[in-house]
């Protein structure tokens, strides 16, 4: 008998037992709870120390500092043309506190756009400094001479930086380093002679430049804070200096931000379809998970209090070779004491791992809540998918010191709010409408504060797509 004949013979035989398809009608199906791909590890929410805020506002009191502005210039782009916003010229030390927008607008018009290819020298060491350069786009290295005669990289500048500002107040200034383009750069050059021509016509600008003192009269420490006068190492009976600690007159206040949604559940679903899992509980659980994901996103990216936007300019570093190298991570750590953690996109962590592999380095890992977390110099590197990746496949790595006692970064929330299910997170019953739909208001209050500037640092423009 052929194979086909055997199959037909089996099909012709009557069924001898109950089929599985029919049997499933009597079986109890084992079901999972609703799953959700959006849920992440949310290490920032787990590792950030939280301070309880009364009255919805947290004020950060600091010693008086003379530092003004954020040190970064903002531009507008129209097609391939770039222009500096006139008010942003006030970031230049010589023009700080000068507020005549008409004159600043004329100065902005005098800025000359130039482009440089990678490797081009923008300014040469020892030459006369007669222009201020505003870096609209790209990366520039400041190269000086090391103690043994070799070239040394003094720093890396990126979008929004400026250099050569001494040209505006010192006609005899020279370049004390060489500025070289690392990538293709778009730069606005402001010649000193153009500023002098405008000052000849504008008395307010002329007076402002004449009164400018590059060495401020106020005595300050290296952090820009008002100096506390002390005496040390003296003998005999000298006059001991008198002093006091001055505070900022208008300290920054952080108001708690909010994330909200209204969850709707039909009464028929809540009444009839609650076995083996409660529908309302599952709806609330997934809604709360989404709310926490948004909360962490805001703590990273919010323009008012987010970590990426609240890092001081002098705490923003640029990678020397584009990729996140061990050298860059060391530099990031060196900018602050007691760093508690890194935050990086998983792809940035992978890129850092590739650089370690090239050098034959194996970063240690530690166990945190049952998870193996990689470390660098003993500081854990936590993954955070909320840190954005740009179209150019670059991202940022955050390093921070945490806790109020350490003058670090802290999270802000207010515990004890009505209908609270977790600290600063509430679910409030809003009633049932005419369509028999139950409504719940789900609310989370939160924010973050950087207590002192050096508590937070960011390694910007990190390349994650280089594999060689």
Image: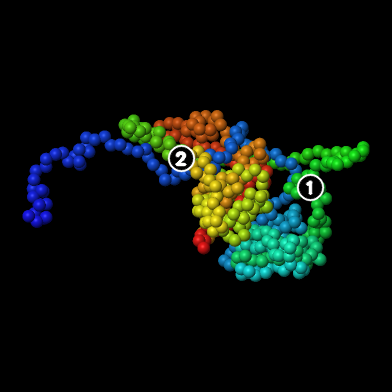
Helix, strand or loop under label 1 = loop
Q: Nearer the viewer, residue 169 or 409?
A: 409
User: Label 1, label 2: how many angstroms apart (C-alpha)?
Assistant: 47 Å
Q: How is the image coloured?
A: rainbow
Q: What residue is pinned by disc 1?
A: 220
Q: Residue at x 68, y 52 (%)?
A: 314
Specify whether 147 is left or right of 414. Answer: right
The residue that appears at 51% across and 41% down in the rendered structure is: 367
The disc, 1 or 2, on the residue closer to the chain's N-terminal end is 1
Task: Tell me what residue is drawn at x 46 percent, y 38 percent.
Answer: 288
In the picture, the disc for residue 202 is: none
Can you give x and y, in whole percent of width and height, for residue 193 in the image?
A: 77, 68
Whether label 1 touches label 2, CB < 8 Å: no
> In the figure, 418 relative to 1: above or below?
above
Q: Which residue is mark 2?
A: 289
Please name the residue shown 60% across and 33% down the image: 52
46 w.r.t. 218: above or below: above
Query: Which of the pair 329/464 is nearer the observer?
Result: 329
Q: Disc 2 on helix, strand or loop?
A: helix
Residue 105 visible to an observer of this rendering: no
Which quadrant of the structure image shows residue 14?
Answer: top left
Foreground residue among 264 and 408: 408
Q: Position of residue 310 (x, y in %)?
A: 62, 48
The outermost residue toward the front is 360
Furthest-right residue in this view: 237
Q: Residues within 10 Å of mark 2 (few under 14, many from 20)?
A: some
> Which quadrant holds the N terminus?
bottom left
What x and y, as percent, mark residue 466?
Answer: 52, 61
Residue 184 visible to the viewer: yes
Give the mark count: 2
């Amino acid at each position: 008998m052929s194979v086909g004949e055997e199959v037909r013979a089996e099909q012709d035989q009557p069924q001898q037992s109950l089929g599985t398809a029919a049997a499933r009608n009597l079986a109890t199906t084992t079901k999972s709870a609703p799953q959700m791909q959006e849920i992440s590890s949310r290490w920032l929410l787990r590792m950030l120390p939280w301070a309880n805020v009364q009255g919805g506002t947290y004020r950060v009191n600091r010693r008086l500092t003379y530092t003004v502005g954020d040190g970064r210039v903002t531009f507008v782009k129209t097609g391939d043309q770039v222009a500096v916003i006139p008010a942003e010229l006030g970031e230049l030390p010589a023009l700080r506190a000068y507020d005549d927008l008409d004159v600043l607008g004329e100065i902005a018009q005098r800025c000359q756009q130039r482009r440089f290819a990678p490797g081009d020298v923008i300014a040469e060491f020892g030459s006369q400094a007669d222009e201020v350069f505003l870096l609209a786009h790209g990366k520039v290295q400041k190269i000086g001479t090391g103690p043994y005669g070799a070239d040394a990289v003094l720093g890396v500048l990126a979008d929004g930086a400026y250099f050569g500002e001494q040209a505006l107040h010192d006609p005899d200034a020279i370049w004390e380093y060489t500025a070289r383009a690392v990538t293709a750069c778009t730069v606005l050059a402001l010649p000193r002679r153009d500023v002098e021509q405008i000052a000849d016509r504008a008395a307010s600008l002329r007076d402002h430049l004449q009164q400018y003192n590059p060495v401020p009269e106020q005595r300050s420490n290296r952090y820009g804070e008002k100096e506390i006068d002390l005496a040390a190492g003296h003998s005999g009976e000298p006059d001991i200096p008198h002093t006091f600690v001055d505070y900022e007159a208008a300290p920054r206040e952080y108001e708690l931000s909010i994330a909200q949604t209204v969850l709707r559940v039909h009464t028929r679903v809540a009444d009839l379809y609650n076995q083996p899992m409660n529908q309302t509980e599952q709806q609330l659980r997934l809604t709360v998970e989404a709310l926490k994901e948004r909360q962490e996103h805001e703590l990273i990216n919010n323009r008012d209090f987010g970590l990426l936007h609240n890092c001081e300019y002098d705490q923003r570093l640029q990678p020397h070779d584009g990729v996140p190298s061990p050298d860059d991570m060391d530099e990031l750590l060196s900018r602050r004491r007691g760093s508690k953690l890194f935050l990086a996109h998983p792809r940035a962590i992978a890129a850092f791992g590739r650089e370690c592999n090239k050098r034959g380095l194996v970063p240690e890992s530690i166990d945190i809540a049952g998870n193996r977390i990689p470390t660098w110099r003993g500081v854990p590197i936590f993954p955070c998918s909320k840190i954005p990746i740009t179209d150019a496949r670059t991202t940022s790595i955050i390093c921070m010191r945490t806790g109020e006692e350490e003058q670090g970064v802290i999270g802000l929330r207010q515990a004890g709010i009505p209908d609270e299910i977790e600290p600063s997170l509430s679910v409030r019953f809003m009633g049932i409408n005419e369509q028999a739909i139950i409504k719940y208001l789900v609310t989370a209050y939160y924010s973050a504060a950087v207590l002192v500037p050096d508590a937070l640092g960011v390694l910007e423009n990190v390349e994650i797509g280089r594999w060689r």
